[in-house]
Image (cartoon, rainbow, N blue to C red):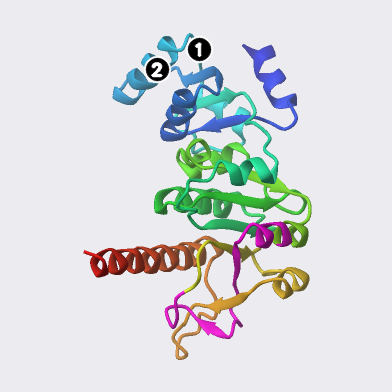
């Protein structure tokens, strides 16, 4: 057991997911190589995870809570850790080809460094029906066990890919018909004041730094969330802002589709 754990820790990049929901989602997707569970666990969640692993012929090992925490470097693993095969590396062309015909909004992240924010954005994007998440390869959080825990299965249900150059990626997306929307606290468009064209890419900047100037200059719209002027809070957490912006985009899109549907009945 000890040797196996050391091998896991030396893998680069580390491919671990943790937490009950994330582990079960990884099992269902067929990505799990080995399942590690707390030796003190004995509940309904344990039976569900074990049954999935047995059906898929996945190796199951029991170990202490401390060992699981050591493997993942976090304590919030809930007693479930999985070593997974790395996800398929997609080209941008393949990423876009795999989008549904409805072409839902895409999320692009410019150097989100906090794993909790990264995981939360992935979870929100998956829950609201985004088409996928693109993030900068350099200067961003990696897809760690912490990210997978917060994403709560979102890593398995949403296409996610890293890109080397955001500006070049934006230009390629524009050539495929996408409009580029920047979430910018100093944007000239107030969220909710107008509808946005479709399909759209929402760019969100990193904690404390925002979207880089060159990336901002390549955007079609710069939109801000209206905050109360009397409040001392001048900005929102990156994941919270992403959720508000994405929800507005998707709701307005659904309302417009519903109105068109009613118009032609």
Left or right, 222 with respect to 104, comes to right
Most extreme residue toward the front is 264
In the image, what residue occupies the spot 50% across and 12% down? Answer: 58
In the image, what residue occupies the spot 42% across and 78% down? Answer: 192
Q: Secondary structure at mark 2?
A: helix
**Magenta-colored stretch includes residue 188:** yes
Left or right, 172 with respect to 232, comes to right
**Magenta-colored stretch includes residue 230:** no
Q: In the image, which disc is placed on residue 32? A: none
What residue did someone put label 1 on? 58
Is 127 rendered above or below residue 212?
above
Which of the two discs, 2 and 1, labels the residue nearer the N terminus? 2
Task: Provide the residue span drawn in magenta.
Answer: 171-195
Is 175 rendered above or below residue 64?
below
In the image, what residue occupies the spot 75% across and 25% down? Answer: 10
What residue did someone put label 2 on? 52
Instruction: Choose between 105 and 7: the one closer to the eye.
Output: 105
Instruction: Choose between 218 and 102: the one closer to the eye.
Output: 102
- In the rendered image, residue 208, in percent from the top left (x then y), is placed at 66, 69
- In the rendered image, residue 65, in percent from the top left (x then y), is placed at 50, 26
Disc 2 and disc 1: Cα gap in Å? 8 Å
Q: Are marks 2 and 1 in contact (CB under 8 Å)?
A: yes
Left or right, 94 with respect to 82, comes to right
| Visible residue check, residue 31 | yes
Is 177 rendered above or below residue 83?
below
């Amino acid at each position: 057991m000890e040797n196996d754990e050391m091998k896991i820790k030396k893998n680069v990049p580390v491919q671990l997911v943790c937490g009950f929901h994330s582990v079960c989602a990884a099992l269902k997707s067929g990505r799990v190589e080995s399942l590690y569970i707390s030796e003190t666990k004995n509940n309904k969640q344990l039976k569900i995870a074990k049954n999935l692993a047995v059906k898929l012929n996945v190796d199951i090992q029991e170990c202490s809570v401390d060992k699981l925490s050591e493997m993942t470097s976090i304590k919030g693993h809930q007693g479930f850790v999985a070593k997974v095969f790395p996800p398929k590396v997609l080209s941008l062309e393949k990423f876009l080809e795999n989008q549904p015909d409805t072409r839902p909004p895409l999320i692009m992240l410019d150097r989100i460094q906090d794993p909790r924010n990264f995981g939360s954005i992935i979870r929100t994007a998956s829950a609201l029906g985004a088409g996928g998440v693109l993030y900068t390869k350099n200067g961003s959080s990696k897809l760690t066990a912490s990210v997978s825990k917060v994403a709560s299965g979102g890593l398995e249900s949403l296409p996610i890919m890293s890109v080397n150059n955001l500006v070049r990626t934006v230009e390629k997306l524009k050539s495929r018909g996408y409009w580029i929307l920047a979430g910018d606290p100093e944007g000239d468009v107030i969220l909710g004041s107008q509808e946005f064209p479709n399909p759209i890419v929402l760019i969100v900047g990193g904690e404390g730094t925002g979207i880089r100037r060159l990336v901002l200059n390549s955007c079609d719209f710069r939109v801000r969330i209206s905050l109360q002027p009397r409040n001392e809070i001048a900005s929102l957490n990156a994941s919270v802002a992403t959720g508000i912006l994405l929800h507005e985009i998707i709701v307005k899109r659904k309302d417009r589709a519903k109105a068109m549907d009613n118009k032609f009945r």
